[in-house]
Amino acid sequence: MHKVALMDTSGNSLLSGSDGSKRKVCYFYDSDVENYYYGLGHPMKPLRMKMTHALLTQYGLLDRMHVLKPNPARENDFCRFHADDYVYFLRRVTPDSQQELLKQLKRFNVGEDCPVFDGLYSFCQTCAGGSIGGAVKLNHKHCDIAINWSGGLHHAKKCEASGFCYVNDIVLAILELLKTHERVLYVDIDIHHGDGVEEAFYITDRVMTVSFHKFGDYFPGTGDIRDIGYGKGKYYALNVPLDDGIDDESYQSLFKPIMSKVMEVYRPGAIVLQCGADSLSGDRLGFFNLSVKGHAECVRFMRSFNVPLLLLGGGGYTLRNVARCWCYEVYILYTFDKRNVVHFKIFLLVLGFIMTFDRLWKILNLSIEYEYTLHVAPSNMENKNSREMLDGIRAKLLDYLSKLQHAPSVQFQEHPPETQFPEENEDEDNKDERINDDSDVNLDYESATTEKAQKEIVEPKAKVQDSTVAGEADGDYCKFSKLTGELIKI
């Protein structure tokens, strides 16, 4: 069994100083992603990845990370979760051919929110490839943290697109992590409910999903606090429904105690954190009032448990704020304690006596910009989340968690085959790019079809009798996972 040591739930267990700076971070980025365009007036802008990358470059943060171009996900990768006919449709449809596929467009919910655009399938391959690649890196212990800001598309379902999302890269990454880890924790701080991920793992205890989101008359309309999972997955789906205007203090009054208890009880082997930036103040489609620092505090807090972490993007529709937020959240991965920041600034001042003014100003300006230029101040909008409401939500969720057994164990019938890596190219000159043929994240996808992999399928011993929550078990709403050996709601 994989063991995770109990952590200080105050969130201060992260290694500091030189130890913390040695943490290995893999960052997945494909410069082609900026060229995809959802269409005139559409709020989803892949250009925000380029803006984030430019900020990371300007602040010198790329030098601290292993920068990788993701291998495109393949059709059989998509089919580990998505229906074959849906994947075939995504591969086939183009702006020119869509008029011939009107029936399929309606069936797969592709249209206004999820339009057909040039390179749609390639876009899906890039986004999912980074998330799967990050999971593989974590599984092989090639890094402590993996980042794919083009991922986090949490609304996509097994057989349909939804909410600007076509392929659910998060589910695919979690399935990859489950090859190595008995339990995976998914945390979602996008303003929208992470419905696609919750639905995929609704009746298993191998994945716990926790979503903090706006609830009510708001897309996708799911995520009630009473939705807690079903069967073996009961209490392993947690929803934190929030109202307009929530600020940093109110948000953290829920996030930290709930996630501390989750980590104490569930003890995951890996964490996937969806960092949708539409929960920031001033977002084009959002109604929360979080600052960049408040949003990033969630990243810092989850990182403090020293568990392998996959950071993904998500929503975010005021582009400059999205780029600021994700850049700052990379920065705080290397900033562990306020005392360390103070000591660093003192060091810079002392160092200034032996440096040229121009060089000193460049370094000091960098530190100042992290603290101020990247900051998005909250507005004066009303916080409709009363203290009584927050206390009630917190008490209810902690009560749910008290009903769980600590760290449920999993017995593999046969361990899934490990994804293999080619040898790393130690003489690689350009760390920001890599050739696909020599890539150290070139997944051995074909091994998944070996005879050994076929033995992973676990047939059900009995059908689900009560279908009031999970849907009809013998219909189109459930399937048995080849990886977890359990019934998965679809």
Image (cartoon, rainbow, N blue to C red):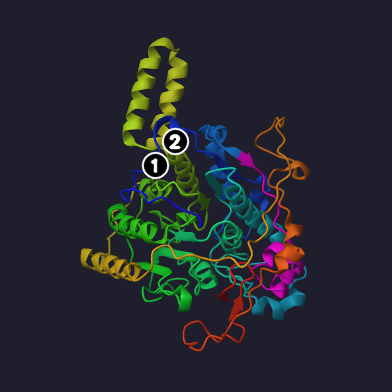
Q: Earlier in the sequence, mark 2 or mark 1?
A: 1
Q: In this orientation, which residue lies closer to the viewer: 75 or 9? A: 9
Image spot of residue 369 (x, y percent): 42, 33
Q: Which quadrant of the rendered structure holds the C terminus?
A: bottom right
User: What's the mark number on residue 154?
Assistant: none
Amino acid identity at mark 2 = Gly
Classify residue 404 by image quadrant: bottom left
Image spot of residue 354 (x, y percent): 42, 10
Q: Is residue 74 left or right of residue 228?
A: right
Q: Is residue 151 magenta?
A: no
Relative to 237, does residue 185 appear above or below in the rendering?
above
Give the residue pinned by disc 1. Answer: 14
Image spot of residue 347 (x, y percent): 37, 21
Q: Is residue 446 visible?
A: yes
Spot the residue most to the bottom.
Answer: 465
Could you tell me how many numbered marks the image carries? 2
User: What's the mark number on residue 20?
Assistant: 2
Residue occupying the point 45% across, 12% down: 356
Q: Secondary structure at mark 1?
A: loop
Contact check, label 2 and label 1, Cβ < 8 Å: yes
Classify residue 334 by image quadrant: top left
Relative to 346, does residue 278 appear above or below in the rendering?
below
Q: Secondary structure at mark 2?
A: helix
Q: Is residue 85 magenta?
A: yes
Question: Which span is picked out in magenta?
Answer: 67-94
Relative to 131, does residue 300 appear above or below in the rendering?
above
Amino acid identity at mark 1 = Leu
Image spot of residue 227 (x, y percent): 41, 75
Spot the residue most to the left.
Answer: 388
Residue occupying the point 31% across, 54% down: 252
